[in-house]
Amino acid sequence: MTRSFLASMEAARRLVLQNDLTQATALIQAQLSGAAPSFDTPPNPAPAFAGPTLELHAEPAGSGSQKPSSAAPSGWHAAPKQAAPRTRPRFPLPGMKAHGNAKAPTLPPGARFEALRHEGRQGARAYRLYTPSRPSEGPRPLVLMLHGCTQNPEDFAIGTRMNALAEEMNVLVAYPEQPRAANSSLCWNWFEPAHQRRGAGEPAILAGIVEDIARANPVDRTRIFAGGLSAGGAMAAVLGAAYPDLFAAVGVHSGLPQGSADTVASALAVMRGGKAPGRGTARGARTIVFHGTADRTVNPINGERLAGLADGSARGAETREGASGGRAFTRTIRPAGADTPAIEHWRIEGLGHAWSGGDAGGSHSDPIGPDASREMLRFFLQP
């Protein structure tokens, strides 16, 4: 491998860090084709990082009436009058904690939102565990929620409103936290082969968190699920493929298929809609997919690939059209086949790279449109 190639890959990493995916992709393509790049290495480059960041900026959410909380912490981007998803700075501003300073969600009397930690052979991770206030008559379902890049558990809990729904449906919800030491942009490393298989890396750590919770709490082992946004959604897809015996179903919001990338270059390409070898849902867990048509960070074709719809076949699928919360959607339902699990795919018109129907108080959350959290739990808990 030549020095010029290594230098170009380093320059591409810097461009990604600066949210210039167009030039990063062009540089990688130029190197692969043997052509000289048509632009210079950016001056004063930012420090290199371990992988691509999926959520460097928020995208317009369209019109809406919700306003951000007046208690928004210092250093957050101000939201316009019309509700739009907000994003936390990729690196902390002066006075901010390393992972932002979002406050923990408000809890009903008797509920708990504990700060816990998993220690295992593959590594350690902190996580939050929400336990509903009302007692359970038996073992509860458990949902593992994986935040996107630049987010943390508290922020993700607020943006998805999953704790409120967990209270309503009496389920446990765990929010693992990706530390900056594992990825400087707090992304789950879905694109690295070391984190794409059973018994290794982050999938093993996340499975270990589930086991910790199941040992300490009455958990219904037939109803354990994983959901996530963007990089977290991509990691949920990995868990569904690697641990279908542990996770009964997974939810992927604005994510990518398992195995669709194995390098920074391939991650950039597949995010932009390039061809990918992702294995989709074959022989994995039941999967529900949400993706917005206006997502400019992760091309919506990735959601279709994950659901097995990209080739246009969708044999035996039922399609329904509707509208909810001000956005139209197309919902495609595929029954389980001989070698594929049941799939549900939501194509949401006008939604950018943000959690549909969420709380504007959280980052990367769009209050307009179908309630992805409620629909995800409905899919998870259905017989």
Image (cartoon, rainbow, N blue to C red):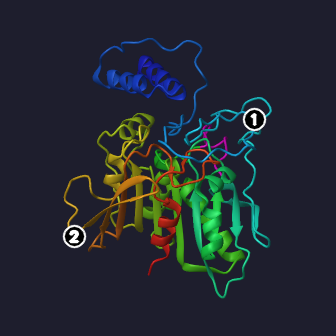
* Viewer-nearest residue: 216 or 377: 377
**Would residue 238 be visible to someone looking at this image?**
no
* Mark in the foreground, 1 or 2: 1
Residue at point 65% right, 54% down? 158
**Would residue 140 be visible to someone looking at this image?**
yes
> Residue 231 at what x, y percent from top left?
51, 47
In the image, taking residue 216 as reference, residue 219 lies left or right, namely left
Q: What element carries label 2?
A: loop
Residue interval drawn in magenta? 177-186
> Residue 370 at what x, y percent from top left?
46, 58
Residue at point 46% right, 52% down? 234
Quarter holding the C terminus is bottom left
In the image, taking residue 93 as reference, residue 222 lies left or right, namely left
Q: Quick one: label 1, few (<14), some, or many (20+) residues within 10 Å? A: some
| 278 drawn magenta | no
> Residue 281 at what x, y percent from top left?
35, 62
Q: Is mark 1 on a helix, strand or loop?
A: loop
Quarter holding the N terminus is top left
Residue at point 77% right, 29% down? 94
Residue at point 27% right, 57% down? 309
Labelled disc at residue 74: 1
165 relative to 367, above or below: below
Residue at the outermost bottom position: 137
Q: How far apart are marks 1 and 2 (CA)?
A: 51 Å
- Name the amino acid, label 1: Ser
> Residue 274 at what x, y percent from top left?
31, 39
The residue under label 2 is 316
Tell me which numbered mark, 1 or 2, is placed earlier along the sequence. 1
Q: Quadrant of residue 115?
A: bottom right
58 relative to 190, above or below: above
